[in-house]
Image (tube, rainbow, N blue to C red):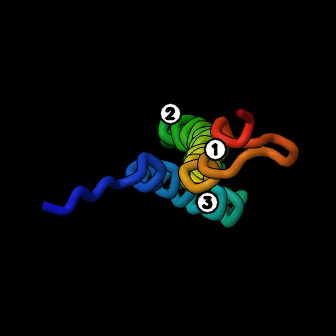
Amino acid sequence: LINVQIPASALSLPSPLAMTTFAVLGIILWAGMSEKCDDFYASNHGMLLTVFHIMVIVMSIASVVGLSTFVGQIITDISSYWNQFSSQYLPIGEKKDEDKA
């Protein structure tokens, strides 16, 4: 059988993308809310409006942290991919063990 391994960065991508999408949609909704709409929800459904504001802020922070983690994983994957090829090369000025004798 073929041994196929999925990198960890591919498995961790959906969560930051979902958080970023919800954060952007929440910011757009919050920015597009008129003063009249905000006053209505504040007077009739104050807890709902407060939870909405908190969730938009939390999702914005979580999306930044999630995307930075994802970028770090991508950098690590690329680094480990290139290191598997560079292990056969020696730094400049060093000789192989068989050449040293």
Task: Report how far apart the C-alphas of labels 3 and 1 lie in the structure.
Answer: 22 Å
Which residue corresponds to mark 2? 47
Tell me the quarter of the picture where residue 96 sits.
top right
> Looking at numbered disc 1 in the image, what kind of residue is underneath it?
Gly
Quarter of the figure with the C terminus = top right
Work out whether mark 3 precedes mark 1 in sequence or the reverse, and give the earlier one.
Answer: 3
Is 84 left, or right, of 27 in this rendering?
left
In this image, 95 relative to 39: left or right? right
- Residue at (67% x, 66% y) in the render: 32
Circle 1 sits on which residue?
Answer: 72
Between circles 2 and 3, the one closer to the viewer is 3
User: Is 62 positioned to the left or the right of 31 in the image?
Assistant: left
Q: Is residue 97 visible?
A: yes
Label 3 environment density (alpha carbons within 10 Å; few <14, some 14–19, many ≥20)? some
Instruction: Give SS at disc 3.
Output: helix
Q: State the mark number for residue 22.
A: none
N-terminal of the two: label 2 or label 1? 2
User: Considering depth in this image, is 78 or 69 the residue closer to the camera?
Assistant: 78
Q: Earlier in the sequence, mark 2 or mark 3?
A: 3
* Residue nearest the viewer, comparing 74 with 33: 74
Which residue lies at the image location 54% right of the left edge and 50% below the top edge?
84
Q: Determine the residue positioned at 80% across, 40% down.
A: 94
- Work out which residue is located at the far front of the displayed protein and give it: 101
- The residue under label 3 is 24
Most distant residue in the left direction: 1
Residue 34 x %, y %: 69, 63
Residue 80 placed where, x, y %? Answer: 57, 47
Disc 3 marks a residue whose amino acid type is Val
